[in-house]
């Protein structure tokens, strides 16, 4: 995995098989709207070499009865589960 430390790009080996992607709802909607969700997920798998991906979507203004996102057929070849985090605090409480 590549990280930036003291303005230098550093590559480190990651042996974790599970990866948690935390993304804001606006960015998530844009990925779906532009048909880039599948590409983004593949890039995450490629960069992290993980076997399982959990996506936490946060940033909704208020609690809604249903989430209306076009996730019906995002053409994902691997199992992915979507969970919505209602508040910033939910990021630390998030568990898969």
Image (cartoon, rainbow, N blue to C red):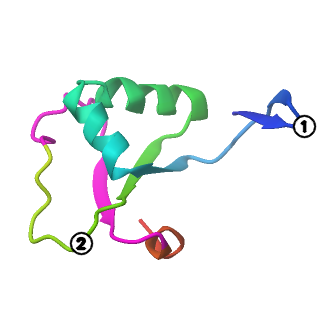
**Where does label 2 land, which residue?**
62
Q: Quadrant of the N terminus?
A: top right
| Foreground of the two, 59 or 81 | 59
Q: Residues within 10 Å of mark 2 (few under 14, many from 20)?
A: few
Q: Residue at x 70, y 40 (%)?
A: 14
Q: Is residue 87 magenta?
A: yes
Q: Position of residue 71 (x, y in %)?
A: 16, 42
Q: Which residues are magenta?
A: 70-88
Query: Foreground: 1 or 16?
Result: 1
Q: Which mark is residue 6?
A: 1
Is 2 left, or right, of 33 in this rendering? right
Question: Mark 1 and 2 residues: CB-CB less than 8 Å, in contact?
Answer: no
Q: Is residue 91 left or right of residue 10?
A: left
Tell me the tag on residue 27. none
In front: mark 1 or mark 2?
2
Locate residue 96: give its quadrant.
Answer: bottom left
Mark found first going from the N terminus, 1 or 2: 1
What residue is drawn where x is 52% and y is 50%?
A: 18
Q: Residue at x 30, y 60 (%)?
A: 83
Magenta stretch: residue 89 in it?
no
Where 24 sits versus 47, above or below? Answer: below
Secondary structure category for the residue under label 1: loop
Mark 2 lies on a secondary structure that is loop
Give the residue drawn at x 9%, y 41%: 72
Residue 90 position, x and y percent, is: 44, 73
* Rendering coords of residue 3 (x, y %): 75, 35
Q: How far separated are the C-alphas under marks 1 and 2?
A: 38 Å
Quarter of the image for residue 32 reads top left
Query: In the rendered view, does 11 fall on the left or right side of 67?
Result: right
């Amino acid at each position: 995995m590549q990280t930036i430390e003291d303005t230098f790009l550093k590559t480190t080996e990651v042996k974790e098989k599970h990866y948690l992607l935390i993304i804001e709802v606006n960015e998530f909607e844009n990925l779906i709207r532009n048909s880039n969700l599948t590409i983004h997920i593949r890039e995450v798998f490629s960069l992290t070499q993980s076997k399982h991906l959990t996506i936490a979507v946060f940033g909704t203004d208020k609690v809604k009865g249903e989430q209306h996102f076009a996730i019906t057929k995002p053409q994902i070849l691997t199992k992915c589960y979507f969970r919505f985090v209602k508040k910033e605090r939910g990021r630390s409480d998030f568990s898969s």
